[in-house]
Image (cartoon, rainbow, N blue to C red):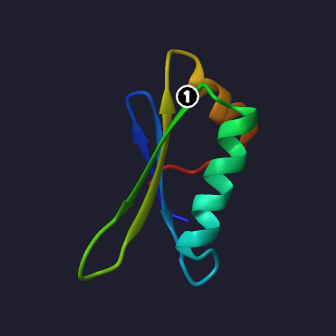
Amino acid sequence: MKVELLADGYTFLIDTKQMPIGEVAEWIELEHRCCPFFDFELAVYGEDGAVWLSLKGRPGVKQFIEADMPKLRVR
């Protein structure tokens, strides 16, 4: 999975063969219920069909993501 660092979080390139956009949207809905401090952004780009999911938020959110995903690799 490709991951990019943001000032206030991370953005992830989603493999829609493994997780279709509809499932990503369902995951966002469920995750928002338990972690309302996340700001979610789902971007779908035209011709190449790239799907990016950004998780970001207030101070401390980035560290929360890192603690929850210890194997997070930024490229």
Image side of residue 39 versus residue 28, left or right:
left
- Residue placed most toward the observer, 52 or 74: 52
On the image, the x and y values in percent for residue 71 come to: 70, 49
* Mark 1 neighbour class, 10 Å CA radius: few under 14, some 14 to 19, many 20 or more: many
Q: Against 47, is 53 above or below?
A: above
On the image, the x and y values in percent for residue 73 come to: 57, 51
Q: Residue furthest left?
A: 47
Q: Is residue 71 visible?
A: no
Q: Residue furthest top?
A: 59
On the image, the x and y values in percent for residue 38 come to: 57, 32
Q: Residue at x 58, y 71 (%)?
A: 22
Q: Against 53, is 46 above or below?
A: below
**Of the residues shown, which amino acid type is indicated by label 1?**
Lys
| Residue position for label 1 | 62
Q: Against 34, is 1 above or below?
A: below
Q: How many marks?
A: 1
Where's the N terminus, which quadrant? bottom right
Q: Residue at x 37, y 72 (%)?
A: 50
Q: Against 73, is 9 above or below?
A: above
Quarter of image, res 48:
bottom left
On the image, the x and y values in percent for residue 62 come to: 55, 28
Where's the C terminus, which quadrant? bottom left
- Residue placed most toward the observer, 3 or 50: 50
Q: Is residue 68 visible?
A: yes
For label 1, the SS is helix
Q: Residue at x 65, y 34 (%)?
A: 66
